[in-house]
Image: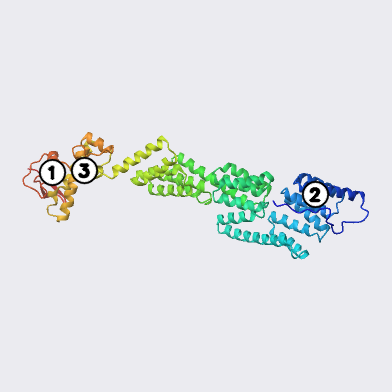
Amino acid sequence: MAAVDIDMPMEPESGSQIFNLMDLEREAEVFKEEGNAFYINKAYSEAFSCYSKAIDACPKNASYYGNRAATLMMLSRFREALEDSQQAVRLDECFMKGHLREGKCHLSLGNAMAASRCFQKVLELEPGNMQAQQEHKNASSILEFERVAESGFEKRDFRKVVYCMDRALGVASACHRFKILKAECLALLGRYPEAQSVASDILRIDSTNADALYVRGLCLYYEDCIDKAVQFFVQALRMAPDHEKARLACRNAKALKAKKEEGNQAFKDCSYEAAYRLYTEALTIDPNNIKTNAKLYCNRGTAGVKLTKLDQAIEDCTSAIKLDPTYIKAYLRRAQCYTDTEQYDDAVRDYEKVYQTEKTKEHKQLLKAAQLELKKSKRKDYYKVLGIGKNATDDEIKKAYRKRALMHHPDRHSAATTEVQKEEEKKFKEVGEAFTVLSDPKKKCRYDSGHDLDDDGGCGGGGGDFDANNIFRAFFGGQGQGQGQGGGGGYNFESSPNAGPGNFFFQFG
């Protein structure tokens, strides 16, 4: 802080010099001179002590209060300095330095309107006072920053509020109100360590400051430390029973904790519908609580999985990640949902994000498994071709082949259009490929493991000497009576006398 001018002995004070000074007044002047010497050497604590002794000796002297005010300002004790400045101008209304110091104290404490009145008084006493002119401008700028900040807070433009408060605090460095508003907006922006630091600094000076206690609790509340947050809110209300923000935050914190715990208990009891509903209700309590809401979305996503609402579970995990991009559990849960819905590209991206953040052995294995599933998904899915599950038995594979082979055999579609015949012949060949691989334990094992089958007799890629008709004949053991459209062994398809249109049966020769 720039040094504040003090009143030296050679500067006569209005009404303070009299002839034949009394002994007490002479003693006071000695203390003042000692104080001035300490002040010049920046020994402000010693200067404060000397000026206090001068005031004790002669309590009606305005300059003594003015000098002690200047010293207190250098010690950043602006509230005490304000009292001394106000006492100085009460003793001498024309004490220009007293008015100037009072204005600067008001300004440092954030009272811009009061500061403006003081600087205006100085300019009335001394119209050309450059310092008063500049400080008057500073007071006007603070009023403008307050106006813009108030508008920004109403619009929830918290970054603008922080900017305005930073500018205002450049002048009003001791204003707790500006610091609290900045800290509250930092908390609402998720910048909790910064907000806590500001609030803690104030609490070190004034442990009963209800606003600082509220902001400290708000940071804990938004960091999902709800029990500790409630303690600070209760303490703030004890200091200021009418603190509306602390009351609302305390109510929200208790309600959110209770509803979340109800949902968790319902989930543990396997009451997934109830858990889903309770998490949904909890999400409506406080949209500003980002971290807790991220957990609620993730929890609801877990309940959604149990209810087979996989698409909704993915949306919930995505909402959780938007609120908290560092939320690993939400990435893992969404990745599993993507895997379960065969969206392997998305699953791989999520597992890559997780592994980049936490390079654990488990996360590496999950990533590799997803990459393998992605690789497998880009091949023909022989299980889908046959219409069976991946755990199908040998008998189920044979039955599925029989059904699909008969369904797509070229002879069955000899009367169809050329386009249909080509499509059915293609499907017939795919059915043969699928059966060739899945009916052979060795090939099936390689296929299930994600290995390429091109080196295993050409199966799996449609190359080599693969012939779907040979597989068909070998499976059914038939010898044709004629040659069908696709060279399929001469199996005749006839309408069944007992079947409706579109139903057929084979006649084998």
Task: Identify the disc placed on residue 64.
Answer: none
Q: CA distance from mark 2 to mark 1?
A: 113 Å
What's under tag 2, amino acid-wise? Answer: Asn
**Foreground: disc 1 or disc 3:** 3
- Residue at 63% in and 59% down: 146
Element type at mark 1: helix
Q: Which residue is mark 2?
A: 36
The alpha-carbon separation of the residues under discs 3 and 2 comes to 98 Å
Upstream in sequence: badge 1 or badge 3: 3
Secondary structure state at the residue bearing disc 3? loop
- What number is the disc on residue 461? 3
- What x and y, as percent, mark residue 274? 46, 45
Q: Please provide percent x and percent y for residue 252.
A: 57, 49
Task: State if disc 3 and disc 1 touch (CB < 8 Å).
Answer: no
Q: In the displayed image of the protein, which residue is found farthest to the left?
A: 481
Image coordinates for residue 461, horizontal then vertical, percent: 21, 43
Kindly indicate the quadrant of the structure image that contains residue 160: bottom right
Mark yes or no: residue 254 visible: no
Above or below for 16 versus 326: below
Count residues near mark 1 (Cα–Cα under 10 Å), then give few for <14, some for 14-19, many for 20+: some
Q: Amino acid at mark 1?
A: Asn
Dot 2 falls on a residue whose secondary structure is helix
Residue located beneath label 1 in the image: 469
- Disc 2 to disc 1: CB gap under 8 Å: no
Q: Nearer the viewer, residue 356 or 416?
A: 356
The percent coordinates of residue 451 (x first, y second) are: 26, 38
Classify 100 as above or below 439.
below
At label 3, which amino acid type do we have?
Answer: Gly
The residue nearer to you, when weighing 27 against 494, is 27
The residue closer to the viewer here, 313 or 141, is 141
Q: Is residue 40 rendered to the left or right of residue 495?
A: right
Near mark 3 (Cα within 10 A), the count class, few <14, some 14-19 or many ≥20, is some
